[in-house]
Image (cartoon, rainbow, N blue to C red):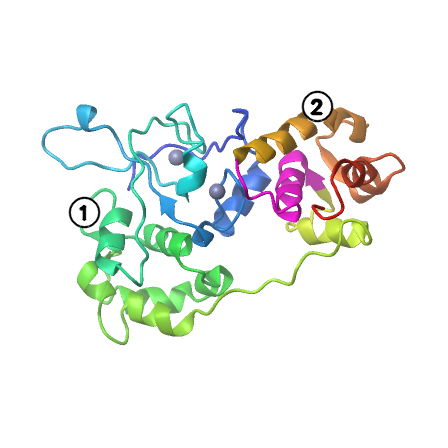
Amino acid sequence: MSGFGGDAATTPGGTPLSPACQNLVRVHAECAICFNPLCMEPCVVLMESEATRPADRQLRRVCRHYFHQACINDVRDGRCPMCRVDFASTPVLPNALEHPDEWFHTVDANADGGLNYEEAIEGLKTCLDLDWRKIETDADTLWPRWDPDRNGKVSLEEANTPGTGMFAYLKEHYPKAERPPAPSIRSRPRDWFAYWDEDHSNSLDKDELCRAIIKTARMTAGACEIRAVHSFLDSTWFLFDPNGDGTLSINEFVAREGMHETLCASFPPDAL
Ligand SMILES: [Zn+2]
Ligand SMILES: [Zn+2]
């Protein structure tokens, strides 16, 4: 799938997501619009236009990104929210275990008959509630089993091999990943901050904080609340980041009249 666009993820406002947040979205297999796990809802891929497709090949995906179907429906400009490439349609990604052949052909966007490691893992994480840490840790062991002819790609036939194929192995070995719930932002703000500081940088940048707020507030209903969080942070960030380094330390976060107090005052108790 070479030749796909870059990884310049953008917020709904059109500004690039920070590298730290892009990485979070990727490793957690989250929708970059709502920050919920992709596997929670039907997901789509982004396809090129029939009008511009060369006659000698079938339709391709315009990029490697996946989004919730409900979230991409709110995208009005016809461009991928991650890489800004134009798309024409948004077919749903079938579930890998329920419809393996259809899943395979959708993920194999360049129609070369095989999935390389990155394509396979990203496609699987998108539709299955898998423990992604375990998969990535076990990759060296798993991949030779899934690609026994060692050509660097898993064919559909290899994927369907009983017992050792990718589909059989995943079904058997990868139960749901569990992470304990986040501490309360109201009663344990320092613990809440540490929970969302997943790269252990002792700071949260604006996008990391936005993601944490959206997840904490369970703002899954639509893009409007999500945009409200972005604009709240865009318009108030300078108040809470007096040294202007683009990140909040724990002490800046919990300071008197700081971000924590303002957040708790701005959201009803049952929301945050
Ligand atoms: Zn989403
Ligand atoms: Zn994209």
Residue 228 locus on image (x, y percent): 63, 30
- Residue closer to the observer: 249 or 129: 129
Residue at 39 percent of width and 65 percent of height: 140
Q: Quadrant of residue 89?
A: top left
Q: Quadrant of residue 151?
A: bottom left
Residue 216 locus on image (x, y percent): 66, 48
- Name the secondary structure under disc 2: helix
Q: What residue type is labelled 2?
A: Ser
Residue 128 locus on image (x, y percent): 40, 59
Q: Nearer the viewer, mark 1 or mark 2?
A: 2
Residue at 54 percent of width and 30 percent of height: 11
- Name the secondary structure under disc 1: loop
Q: Residue 235 carries which label?
A: 2
Magenta segment: 204-222
In the image, residue 183 lies in the stretch drawn in magenta? no
Asked if the residues shown at circle 1 and circle 2 are in contact, with their CB atoms under 8 angstroms apart, the answer is no
Marks 1 and 2, how far apart at CA:
47 Å
Q: Which amino acid does label 1 sit on?
A: Asp
Q: In which quarter of the image is residue 174?
A: bottom left
Q: Name the residue under label 1.
A: 112
- Is 239 above or below relative to 170? above
